[in-house]
Amino acid sequence: MPNIVKNTTLPSLLDILAPHSCRGCGHIGNVLCDRCKNNIILENSDIKIKTPKSFPPIFVAGQRIGLLDNLIQDLKYHSVRAVAKTLAILLHQTLPRFESSTTIVPLPTISKHIRSRGLDHTLLISKHFAKIRHFRVEKLLIRNQNTVQVGTDRQTRIKQATKAYSINLSIKVNPNTTYILFDDVWTTGASMKAAVKKLRQAGAKKIIVAILAVSDINQ
Ligand SMILES: [Zn+2]
């Protein structure tokens, strides 16, 4: 038996054995070819999310439609690990430069979902993005139990989100560090708003928000 080291930033054995084809055009080689990736970037070059004045600077890679939506679903619900790196590259190419001491804080996924899917998609994308930019990843936020968002209405989601996160007290928050709070999808923004609040309460002074895809830009 080969000695397989479990490292989430390495491709799985299946990824190595089975070549991927582009989800956009079928071109063999990667889950997203350069041409389709550039199309996503061009289509989404001026997406803005309306946030309150006090909200941190927010950067978005795209809309959760078409190809980008398919890729997110492949990673999240069909556990296609190779997509994580592709999405991290997309983030890298759409987000501006940040200072080198930046730390990425992924919004924590519900542990039940991590168990059933066999991966934590937000953490995986964060790790790949951090590797490209030479950033750190810190799991500063902890997901509280019994705060399920899937399938609930907007008001319930907002209410649940305020109780969704705690600060991981084993990690020290540095007021001089720039923290990028990262989530895959922005729907109502309730989760991210709750996460920003927690991180500020813990002493973070420099926060940036990064989102892979916005569900509905009219929210
Ligand atoms: Zn393609």
Image: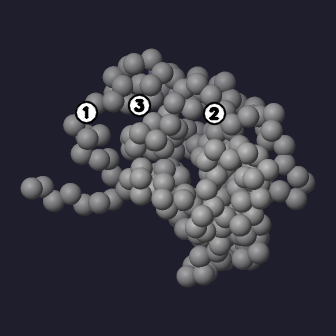
Where is residue 206 shown, x and y percent of the image?
A: 74, 66
Query: Which quarter shows the N terminus?
Result: bottom left
User: Which residue is label 1 attached to?
Assistant: 18
> What's the amino acid at mark 2?
Arg
Residue 131 visible in the current orientation:
no
Name the residue beneath numbered marker 3: 31
Q: Position of residue 119 (x, y in %)?
A: 42, 53
**Residues at marks 3 and 1, CA–CA distance in whole angstroms:** 11 Å
Which tag, 3 or 1, sits closer to the chain's start? 1
Q: Residue at x 32, y 47 (%)?
A: 11
Judge from the rendering whether residue 17 lies leftward or rightward of residue 205; answer left or right: left
Secondary structure of residue under mark 3: loop
Q: Residues within 10 Å of mark 2 (few under 14, many from 20)?
A: many
Q: Position of residue 154 (x, y in %)?
A: 76, 46
* The label number, if any, that marks residue 62 in the structure image: none
Sequence-wise first label, 2 or 1: 1
- The amino acid on which the numbered mark 3 sits, given as a three-letter code, is Val
Residue at point 90%, 54% (across, down): 53
Q: CA distance from mark 2 to mark 1?
A: 27 Å
Which image quadrant is residue 19 in? top left
Within 10 Å of disc 3 (Cα), the crowding (few <14, some 14-19, many 20+) is many
- Dot 1, how many residues are within 10 Å of its Cα: few (below 14), some (14-19), or many (20+)? few
- Closer-to-camera residue (126/155): 155
Q: Dividing the picture into quarters, in which one does residue 104 lie?
A: bottom right
Q: Residue at x 68, y 29 (%)?
A: 44
CA gap between label 3 and label 2 equals 17 Å
Which residue was labeled with disc 2? Answer: 64
Q: Judging from the image, what secondary structure is the residue with disc 1 in?
A: loop
- Amino acid at the residue labelled 1: Ala
